Amino acid sequence: MNDKLIDAWNKMQEKLESWLDSIVVNLPNILIAILVFIAALIASKYISKIARKILDKSRLQPSMKNLISKFISITVVILGLFLILGILNLDKALNTILAGAGVAGLAVGLALQGALANTYSGIILSYIKHIKFGDWIKTNDYEGEVIDIDLRAVTIKQVDNNLVYIPNKLVVDNPIKNYSTTAQSRVILECGVGYESDLRFVKNLTIETIVNNFKAVENKEDVLFLWREFGDSSINYELRFWINSTSALEVAKAQSETMMLIKEVYDENDINIPFPIRTLDFPDNFSLIKDNNEN
């Protein structure tokens, strides 16, 4: 038993001595590897800053600029690690790592198909010009201001100040209505007046009201007034004009202001905006007075 313990102790000493010899022999390579690692960290930092300055001149989204600069920084560090493995004569370990990374990458790709689809869609959204920070958009039945675009989702702030996170894939695959792509937005309002009204007077009065209260409307030709139908209780029209705004919220405010202006000017000129009326036709022998003889 003692011989076995002594033999094990001797083998352990021999192993430790061989490790120590290896460390001493490879000490210059270890020092060089440490210096290379420090240099890689410093280089990644400065290269990332240079890349960010170059990207700032592009039209990419800010979140995508940060992502690309970080990716470049990580790439520099990884290249430094590969160089360190070569300095330390760990080429076999490097081949093993690369082979394992290939298999692991395939497995991860299959498991994260949805996430990768959102990532790819996020890159597309960062390049296209039809959607950017600050735009007011409507997509997937949600409407609001774009405040962020990353590799996972588009974040929009709704009118009620709530945030909605829409996966990038859904934004790319579905229609997008962007209210901010043009310098102007059209206000559309529907209304109706009573059958006793002078239609030409109503039209001229309504157009003059719009021209006098909205700066973007310079003359009567800028206002489109169309009589649409003889309704059940009113003659209905549609009013259209442009305002200098790229926000759906401003359009809604303009619609609200238009409704107040039209109601005020119609009241001043005794123009009736009727509401639906239902007429009840009673038989001639119908009486609302209850007969006292009835129980």
Image (tube, rainbow, N blue to C red):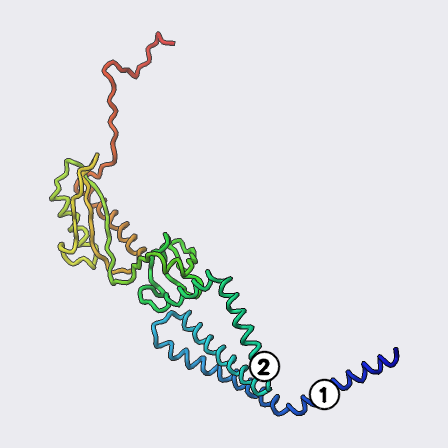
Position above or below: 97 against 281: below
235 relative position to 148: left or right: left
Q: Distance between the Cα atoms at labels 2 and 1?
A: 20 Å
Callout 2–callout 1 Cβ contact below 8 Å: no
Which amino acid does the dot numbered 2 rest on?
Lys
Position above or below: 272 against 42: above
257 relative position to 126: left or right: left
The N terminus - image quarter: bottom right
Q: Of 295 and 282, which appears nearest the observer?
A: 282
For image coordinates 53% across by 85% down, the residue present is 83
Q: In which quarter of the image is residue 61?
A: bottom left
Pinpoint residue 200: horizontal percent, then vertical percent: 11, 44
Pinpoint residue 291: horizontal percent, then vertical percent: 33, 10
The secondary element bearing badge 1 is classed as helix
The secondary element bearing badge 2 is classed as helix
Label 2, on which residue?
92
Q: Quadrant of residue 211?
A: bottom left
Q: Residue furthest top?
A: 293
Q: Residues within 10 Å of mark 1 (few under 14, many from 20)?
A: few
146 relative position to 261: left or right: right
For image coordinates 30% across by 56% down, the residue present is 250
Can residue 271 be seen here? The reply is no
Can residue 232 be seen here? The reply is yes
Position above or below: 68 against 145: below
Q: Of 255 and 175, which appears nearest the observer?
A: 175
For image coordinates 36% across by 58% down, the residue present is 173
Q: In which quarter of the image is residue 274?
A: top left
Q: Count of labels shown?
A: 2
Residue 18's label in the rendered image is 1
The C terminus - image quarter: top left
